[in-house]
Image (cartoon, rainbow, N blue to C red):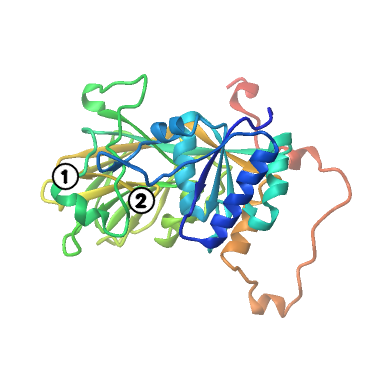
């Protein structure tokens, strides 16, 4: 891996600890002769924030995006990095920090490791979508929808190199590391939504929201809504309804090759579409979106091989059952012999090696 050539810095400006850590990033960059540009993800043009490609271009198309804040700041950095295939390093000064990798105290060591190439690149599956039409936020909705969210992002463009194709819709230039969510707008009006897997109707829901999450996003909103925790090593889509008015309220885990279509039914209330927590448009009855795995992966810088379940245990404050500990404390499991072949590569070999 080549040394870092240019840094883009995304900072949570409301945290003193984040501002102090960001200044350390700038000092490190100056000391190593690496250009470092701040990326203001809230900057506006014509009353709207810039899109990811514009933000990346203004920062000189950095090859490393450093985020300083919590997971929300990290996701904003991922949005910019996805436009230029940059690496992302997250510095945690937030409350949970499930996605961020580095404590502020370890920031300089982390930057040194990235510069040396002494890191693990954690390539995470992302989500994108097609829609019946270009997404937009109607003028009469925008002020209401902006409450507590800051200025809205511009309407998504058509994805470069693709075009609208009849009944398959408009390929929108969006990328989600965590999730794409369709949610009701009015508190007193449920969203009535039909869900298709592939081209087949799965079920129709009257619900507060429907979440389509990646494995990475399974620990975010989907988990809060009762969805499963899925290892990010598994490329999957997790579909989770939020407060559905029906007996079946379970999540469904799908293979990465499958698509989830969501159609707003004829007499439903209007619904909002959010991508990684960022409002991107409003759907009306008869509109639809299709969510599926994107061709690009987000490239996250890790200082060591990721320990996903260790992070789950730590971040969610999991504790062992008192009744179990009364029967004995679990010892460390670390055999000193080499890992046997059937454990090193469990399961059947790939189909191409089986002649299938």
Give the quadrant of the N terminus.
top right
Q: Residue 339 placed where, x, y %?
A: 81, 43
Residue occupying the point 59% across, 26% down:
351
355 and 222: which is toward the camera: 222
Would you say 297 lies left or right of 264 here?
right
- Between marks 2 and 1 in the image, the one whose residue lies nearer the viewer: 1
Instruction: Please tell me the numbered disc located at residue 138.
Output: 1
> The residue tagged with tag 1: helix, strand or loop?
loop
In the rendered structure, which disc, 2 or 1, sits on the residue that comes first in sequence?
A: 1
Residue 155 rendering spot, x and y as whole percentages: 27, 37
User: Residue 87 location, x and y as percent?
Assistant: 57, 36
What residue did someone put label 2 on? 211
Residue furthest right in the image = 336
* Residue at point 70%, 44% (across, down): 305
Give the crowd class for mark 1: few <14, some 14-19, many >=20 residues within 10 Å.
Answer: few
Alpha carbon separation for disc pair 2 and 1:
22 Å
**Residue beneath the point at 32% across and 53% down:** 150
Taking the image as drawn, is residue 184 in sight?
no
Quadrant (top left/top right/bottom left/bottom right) for the C terminus: top right
| Residue 271 numbered mark, or none | none
With respect to residue 8, does 276 lie above or below?
A: below
Q: Is residue 27 left or right of residue 294?
A: right
Q: Secondary structure at mark 2?
A: strand
Asked if residue 82 can be seen in this view, the reply is yes
Q: Residue at x 58, y 42 (%)?
A: 233
* Mark 2 crowdedness (10 Å alpha carbons): few <14, some 14-19, many ≥20: many
266 and 315: which is toward the camera: 315
How far from the left and from the top, in percent, is residue 353?
Answer: 65, 23
């Amino acid at each position: 891996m080549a040394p870092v050539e240019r840094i883009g810095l995304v900072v949570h400006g409301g945290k003193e600890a984040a501002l102090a850590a960001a200044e350390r990033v700038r000092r490190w960059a100056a000391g190593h002769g690496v250009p470092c540009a701040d990326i203001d993800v809230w900057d506006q043009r014509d009353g709207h924030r810039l899109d990811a490609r514009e933000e990346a271009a203004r920062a000189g198309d950095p090859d490393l995006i450093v985020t300083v804040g919590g997971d929300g700041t990290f996701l904003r950095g991922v949005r910019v990095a996805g436009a230029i295939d940059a690496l992302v390093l997250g510095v945690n000064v937030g409350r949970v920090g499930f996605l961020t990798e580095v404590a502020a105290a370890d920031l300089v060591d982390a930057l040194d490791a990235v510069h040396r190439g002494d890191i693990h690149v954690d390539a995470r599956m992302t989500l994108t979508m097609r829609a019946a039409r270009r997404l937009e936020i109607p003028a009469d909705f925008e002020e209401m929808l902006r409450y507590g969210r800051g200025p809205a992002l511009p309407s998504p463009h058509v994805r470069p190199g693709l075009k609208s194709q009849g009944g398959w819709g408009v390929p929108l230039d969006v990328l989600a590391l965590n999730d794409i969510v369709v949610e009701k707008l009015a508190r007193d009006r449920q969203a009535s939504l039909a869900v298709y897997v592939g081209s087949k109707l799965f079920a129709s829901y009257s619900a507060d929201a429907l979440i389509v999450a990646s494995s990475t996003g399974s620990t975010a909103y989907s988990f809060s809504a009762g969805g499963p925790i899925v290892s990010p090593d598994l490329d999957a889509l997790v579909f989770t309804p939020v407060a559905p008015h029906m007996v079946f309220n379970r999540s469904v885990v799908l293979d990465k090759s499958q698509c989830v279509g969501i159609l707003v039914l004829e007499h439903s209330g209007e619904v909002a579409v959010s991508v990684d927590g960022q409002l991107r448009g409003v759907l009306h009855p008869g509109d639809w979106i299709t969510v599926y795995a994107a061709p690009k992966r987000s490239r996250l810088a890790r200082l060591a091989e990721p320990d996903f379940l260790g992070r789950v245990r730590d971040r969610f404050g999991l504790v062992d059952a008192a009744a179990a500990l009364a029967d004995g404390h679990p010892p460390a499991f670390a055999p000193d012999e080499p890992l046997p072949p059937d454990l090193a590569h469990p399961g059947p070999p790939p189909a191409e090696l089986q002649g299938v």
